[in-house]
Amino acid sequence: MNLKQCATILIVGVISTNVFAQKLTKNDSIRVFSDSLFFNLKKNYLYTDEVSWNEIKNRFEENAATHATFENSLKESRAVFDSIGCNHCMLLSENGYYPASPKKQLLYKDYSYEFGKKHSEGVEFSVSKLGDTYGYIEMPGMLLLDLSQEELNAKTQEMYDEIVILDKNNDLKGWIIDLRFNIGGNSYPMINALHYLLGDKVVYNVLNINKEIEEVNKLENGRFYSGEKIETEIKTTNKNPNIKIPVALIIGNWTASAGETIILGFKGRENVITIGEPTYGYLTANSLFELPFKVKAPLTTGYLADMNGNYSENLKPGVFVKEEKSNFENLLKDENIIEAIKFINSKK
């Protein structure tokens, strides 16, 4: 998913600070929260003109009131998101995660036992060397919602530095970026961490309901810009970005949202190939809204498109390899990696 950090805390209606200073009942809390949620949905949701908001809001408040606590009432947001077709929307509280129903269910046949095992163990960002001459980046999903700007920049810098250090200390033929476990999150640090392989460029665009470019997202001088706003910032090294070294992106049917924006970011770059299976298809832009009671709401506000403004529902690989051909115990026997190495070696 692509999360625009919004500094404004949106409190809707004539609600004085005195109201929040006193203890609210559960139903009062639901009403205050509902007003804010639906204000933001009505104002910002991509398909807002197609929705009967009053009817859905009333139903949400009625159903929410049946729960014993305010926190439990947040579960009713799924019915809201499902009814408006917002399968990329969700609520995030300090105690829970309340997403819409998924766009499509991934079945056991869609991934191997080994994939499920590795996913259950947890996948962290890492940079390593495969064989003697290939750089390998494991880039899973990263939510990173509760980091301060300073912490977000530091995390981005750390990932960027790992990539540069491996490249600087080795004579690499190319890079393999594994996005099979990237189910989304905050795309800004992910893409900016890859600045060394992308350089300064437009990485993707956000389109409005008419498929017109509304916001340009780009890398420039170590900064990730969404429109005019700097989202993350790093100190780049004196060494020029390595924007022609071959890069193979390994993708799959779990690759979604922010993972898909990374693929868009490499569109138009020389010497790039995508390998694996078609992506999940969350190519809609989410903006993050702060709601009452420390609840955050990533809400869909646009379409995600490549540097030329081209939008598609999901992204297809250049070389198709079924996920069952993966080998996470020995990557050099992984059919996706084998195809990636073939591509890199062909670019001598």
Image (tube, helix red, strand yellow):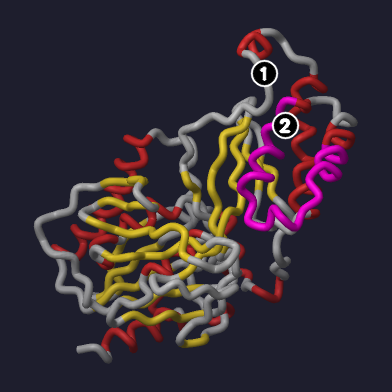
Q: CA distance from mark 1 to mark 2?
A: 10 Å
**Measured from the top left, where is residue 65 in percent x and y?**
87, 29
Does 307 sit left or right of 1 as displayed?
left
Give the residue type that dot 1 points to. Answer: Ile
Q: Residue at x 38, y 75 (%)?
A: 267
Give the number of the disc on residue 35.
2
Q: Is residue 271 above or below residue 45?
A: below
**Measured from the top left, where is residue 257 in percent x and y?**
54, 61
Q: Secondary structure at mark 2?
A: helix
What crowding class fits label 2: few (fewer than 14 Cα within 10 Å), some (14-19), or many (20 or more)?
some
User: Is-magenta flag for residue 36?
Assistant: yes
**Measured from the top left, where is residue 237 in percent x and y?**
14, 54
Total numbered badges shown on the rendered structure: 2
**Measured from the top left, where is residue 317 in percent x and y?**
49, 82
What crowding class fits label 1: few (fewer than 14 Cα within 10 Å), some (14-19), or many (20 or more)?
few
Name the foreground residue: 211 vs 310. 211
Q: Quadrant of the C terminus?
A: bottom left
Does 218 sit left or right of 220 as displayed?
right
Pointer 1 with pointer 2, Cβ within 8 A: yes
Q: Quadrant of residue 134?
A: bottom left
Name the foreground residue: 94 vs 54. 54
Name the foreground residue: 195 vs 172. 195
Give the number of the disc on residue 175.
none
Q: Residue at x 89, y 34 (%)?
A: 62
Q: Which residues are magenta?
A: 32-60
Q: Which residue is mark 1?
A: 15
